[in-house]
Amino acid sequence: MIAPALLSALAGLDRTAFAQSFLAHPLVCATIAGTIAGDPQAGLWTGLCLTVFSAEHIPVGESRIRDWSSVAVAAAFAVAHRDEATQGLVLVCAALCALPAGRAIRGVRALMLRMRDAVDDESLARRPGLILRMQLAGLSLHLLRGALVGTLIYSLLRFLASSVRLEGTLAEGLGLFWQLAAVAGLPVLFRVHVRARLRGRLAEARQWERA
Amino acid sequence: MAALLDLLRLCALQASWNRRGMQELGWLSVAEAHLGSLDDGAWRRRWLGFRNSNPYVAGLALGAGIRAERDGETERVPVLLDALSRQLGAVGDAFIWMGVRPLLAFAAIAAGLWWSPRAVWIAWGIFALCVAIGLRLWCFRRGLRGAEAVLDWIESDRLHRAIAWTRTLAAVSVVAAAAAVLMQVGPRWGMLTIALALGGVSAWRRWPVELCLLGLLGSCWLLAWT
């Protein structure tokens, strides 16, 4: 329980509040979580699926905030050394948890807004210590949020993975889902990165012709 | 030591991000280390306000603002910060969010599936060292040389060529990652067609990811059932 909480806290901090060093990317934090749990391949596949689902997402400014980092850490720990059906079940539940987990980020931001509104500009200009204190408060809130959300999701996923008995066609379907989830996200990736780039190149070529 | 403190403050640019001033307090905390001893805090009033930019390259605007304050061009500072932060936001988003980050992520996926999950650790190391630390410090140092140095960089052909190339390479790495994923799944054409068709419709109709996943889950269950 300590490792998911710790890694989730660090990823929660890295997401927007501090450094943005790529640790919060679902691929990276899931692979690290998988390596810690002793199953790096499952961690990599979990991270890959969640990366594909989150292809259109940028950590600041989106309207529907999804917390892919905490979800990736929790899912990678929960899928380690499980059969494919259980891994599929964990992946579905993890992906569905991303949106509710994002509510916590909105909560932290709302809290930061209230803190900022409570201090007038004149006080900030006269008391530089206040700026540092508010920065530290923001860092602590993001760290705490990551740890709490990660632990909560991990507890839920571990409970599901260990208590739900999967048999028959449902187990087969979930096993198939585990294998195919990444494939279903490929068209979105092509739309976001490849088609957009081709369009950009075509526009550049037309501009060049006109010039 | 001073460089380390600068780096820590630059890394915490978005620590207290909020909808009123966005990165405002982060900008103030970076400037505090350089301008804290200047006067009674008049400079802080000039720096307060709506501040938002790409966190990796915002150091350029910050450095330029600090330089202008030191040179006594105080009336120029708010306009300078505002104009540069907008331009740098656009440049940083195109270069980092749509270029370097997806390039490394999808190259790591391809290498991770074909070689070893260690590729992901390597990609993380490269990004953390070169972008999160290196680029941040370089931008701040360049910004301290003045606004002209920042504008030269923004307008340079090299930067725009680099953006175009990284975005093209990111698109290539997406193709490589897709090939690695398809090879991993194997030649099960029926299942692949269903998954790709569902993903295609989802991409075209811009469905939320949850809807696409539930659709795929239902299709997988039906496949298993039949």
Image (cartoon, grey):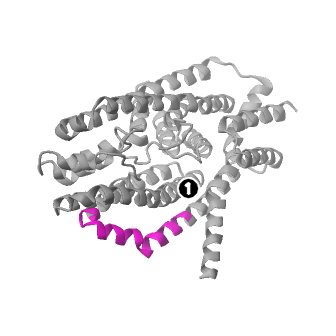
Which of these two is toward me, B147 or A144?
A: B147
Please give the range of residues in magenta: B142-167
Picture coordinates of residue A157, whole percent (x, y):
57, 24
The local crowd at label 1, few if under 14, some if 14 to 19, many if 20 or more residues have their Cα within 10 Å, is many
Picture coordinates of residue B14, whole percent (x, y):
36, 43
Magenta segment, prevailing SS (helix, strand or loop): helix
Residue A174 occupies quadrant: top right
**Residue position marked by numbered label 1 in the rendering:** B111
Residue A201 visible within the image: yes
Residue B12 visible within the image: no
Which residue is found at the position 30% from the left and 55% from the top?
Answer: B78
Which of these two is toward me, B154 or B3?
A: B154
Quarter containing the C terminus of chain A: bottom right
Which residue is found at the position 27% from the left and 51% from the top?
Answer: B7
Magenta highlight on residue B165: yes
Three-letter amino acid code at the position of disc 1: Ala
Which residue is found at the position 64% from the left and 52% from the top?
Answer: A189
Residue B208 occupies quadrant: top right
Which residue is found at the position 60% from the left and 79% from the top?
Answer: A208
What is the tally of numbered marks visible in this picture? 1
Which of these two is toward me, B188 or A71?
A: A71
* Chain of the residue under the numbered disc 1 shown in the image: B
Picture coordinates of residue B154, whole percent (x, y):
40, 68
| B39 versus B17 height, above or below | below
Picture coordinates of residue A30, whole percent (x, y):
51, 39
Work out which residue is located at the far top of the displayed protein and give it.
A163
Left or right: where B149 falls relative to A105: left
Work out which residue is located at the far right of the displayed protein and give it.
B226
Quarter containing the N terminus of chain A: top left
Magenta highlight on residue A10: no
Name the element at disc 1: helix
